[in-house]
Amino acid sequence: MKRVLCLYRVSTKKQLDPSSDKTKADIPLQRKACKEFIDAHQDWVLCKEMYERGVSGYKVSADKRDAIVDIRAEALKKSFDILLVFLSDRLGRREDETPFVVEWFVRNGIEVWSVNEGQLKAESHEEKLLNYIRFWQANGESLKTSIRVSERHKQMVEDGIWRGGVCPYGYRLVFKGRIGKKNRQLLDLEVDPEKSAIVQEIFRLLCLCGYGTYRIANHLNAKYSDPEKIWTPRTIIAMLRNPIYTGRMRFKDTVTSTPLEELRIVSDEMFEFAERILKEHIPKKYALTKRGNFKEVSRSADAPLPAKTKTQVYGASLLSGLLYCAHCDHRLVGTYHTKINARGERVYRPVYRCYNGAVQAKNCSGQRTYSAARIEDAVLATVHQYFSTFSETIDEVWKEQAKAQLQRKRGLDVRNAQAELTKLQQRQNKLKEEAIKALTGESVYAPEMIQELLVSNTEAMNKAEAELQSAEKDRAELDAKLKELVRQYESIHDWAEVFDAAGVDEKKMILSRIIGKITVNRNYDITIYFFLTLDDFKHALVEEGRDNVEACEEPVRKRHFA
């Protein structure tokens, strides 16, 4: 008697539901069909059954599927003679892997059978080619299903329809009249007044009160003692980055372009500023104004701002973090000098100090201290000239023309890669048709030759798909860089309008956005490295037509003055 091991698999947990209409893949049906097939063979006997519940044969590799690993181990022990499945795609749907799984079992003396397709052999070239075509078709079916499901989810997101899943904090699920295919009631999102107030508090604590995620979590756990809800920093970060709170739903990279105002909990400005705080570590005591600028705000009554030190009150601070010694490249520290004047009054003079110059062993040939007023006046004069240059020489018409030119260039690589992939796919279909003719004896080509061409063309298709993905990734990165470049340009215009009226702290934040570094030597020769200049903007978009804006990511322009 030949011992039979049966493998039953379904791809999703939904298929385990008896009420599911996908009866073709239900495990009970597979089990019944396999037992009837065994009974039809008098010399077969069922020795073992193995199940794979909710395991995709397309997404999961055979080496990571526990059932396949266990069956291979049983095969090496000679525990069974026949591996029986309902359909061949129960073994897997990967064209570059599953044919070799079948070949491995055959090579180890195990017969592989399918209830609907008969015995799967892998001895002759024709049989190997037939296996390849069989699993290539199964792979294509899974790929089409994946594309169809993803496209449906994207459409639901774009239409503002709740796709299901875990309800985001701040909302509740309610029935609003939607009915599913099986006459099921489908739930939709609705703002929960009590929970949404906590969501607003989280954003307020981060953007207006200067709290970090750990402090926010501790504050919520102490204020809202709920054993069923324990706040953690990871939870806070996930909420701060979830666009649903602006009324926009998300699926992978697809986000609803038009927000649903009935689902909005926080404003777009606050959400974007929270994202920038998490990415750029902006000091939390600064809030975002309506114009996109930074402004110092007071904290809540239970978290007052700390008292200022003497250095903060009397010392130099405008260029702290930006100013460096040109002799030793050491960062200069803002501080103050104290002296008693002729009237016996204590006078404080803001200065920038190089501590390397104060230590003889550091071998710094520069000064120990520099006049803050002298340096700051010179820097501010150049910054005014910088703002004036942008305001007078760039107009919206020129910017739109440059964006259109760059849009055409960055789409060219994607179109070329897509055309190459389409050509290879058409060739693959022709080879498949020729392979079927070879198996029936209607082709003038040998099956071995067609198999080699199929394998070669598959490798070329994989390479073309990788190139297409790379081109799409490059285009996405370029889009993001261009968006950031335009944002910098627009921010410079906004900052230029409010710079003179801004306070010291706000000026400091604006300077940190446009300047990467400032150096000064003992003769007060000052060099300013701007992140973005007018020449950089033109050079990145028009003159060379480059596909990147790297010049705007590092300080490459210098302005010298004494």
Image (cartoon, rainbow, N blue to C red):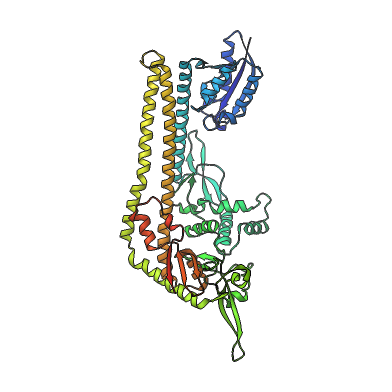
Nearest the eye: 424 or 23: 424
User: In this orientation, which residue lies closer to the viewer: 133 or 339?
Assistant: 339
Looking at the rendered image, the quarter that the N terminus falls into is: top right
90 vs 543: above or below = above
Q: Quadrant of residue 489?
A: bottom left
* Residue 97 position (above or below residue 356): above
- Side (left or right) of 514 relative to 390: right
User: In which quadrant is the C terminus drawn?
Assistant: bottom left
Is 242 on the left or on the right of 552, as rendered?
right
**x then y, percent, for residue 82:** 59, 15
Q: In this view, which residue lies farthest toward the bottom?
A: 343
Provide residue 345's location: percent of width, then percent of height: 61, 88
Can residue 228 be spotted in the picture? yes
Image quadrant where residue 222 sits:
bottom right
Q: Position of residue 361 (x, y in %)?
A: 63, 69
Residue nearer the viewer, 328 or 301: 328
For image coordinates 46% across by 54% down, the residue present is: 261
